[in-house]
Image (cartoon, rainbow, N blue to C red):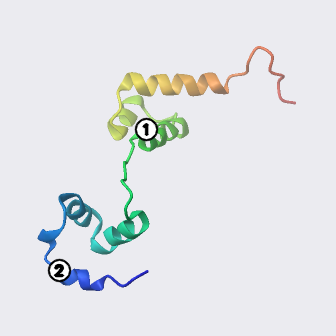
Amino acid sequence: MENYEWMNDVNPEIFTNDFKTAVDLIGLQNTIKLWVAFSKTGIYFSETQILEAKKEYVRTHLDVDTKTLARLLNLSDSYINRLKAKTSEDDSPGLFDQPEK
């Protein structure tokens, strides 16, 4: 990777708002790493990955109180309950499933 240390001496006001926001959030060097990796590419951060992570968290923390999970994950109680119910349905044996021996 090319050395971009010289950018530390550049007035940050010349950067776009998105670039400045990234610098504020993750620092100049990490922003440059992203820029190098995704140069000339429009990046869209979908919330799908976060929602899938929240679902997985609920599935692996079924013993945690619904209200606690809802507050932690910023989801409604009813959504948490639906996820818990679906998970327990997925774990229950089906009509034609053979019991484990």
Q: Which one is in front, 15 or 53?
A: 15
Q: Residue at x 33, y 71 (%)?
A: 32
Q: Residue at x 36, y 30 (%)?
A: 67
Q: Amino acid at mark 1?
A: Leu
Q: Which one is in front, 30 or 44?
A: 44
Q: Residue at x 37, y 48 (%)?
A: 45
Q: Residues within 10 Å of mark 2 (few under 14, many from 20)?
A: few
Q: Are marks 2 and 1 in contact (CB under 8 Å)?
A: no
Name the mark on residue 66. Answer: none
Q: Amino acid at mark 2?
A: Val
Q: Quadrant of residue 69?
A: top left
Q: Which one is in front, 26 or 68?
A: 26
Count of numbered badges drawn on the protein: 2
Name the mark on residue 51. Answer: 1
98 lies above or below 39: above
Q: Residues within 10 Å of mark 1 (few under 14, many from 20)?
A: few
Q: Position of residue 23 (x, y in %)?
A: 24, 67
Q: Check disc 2 and report the residue beneath it.
A: 10
Per the image, label 1 sits on a secondary structure element best described as: helix
Which quarter shows the C terminus? top right
Q: Quadrant of residue 100?
A: top right
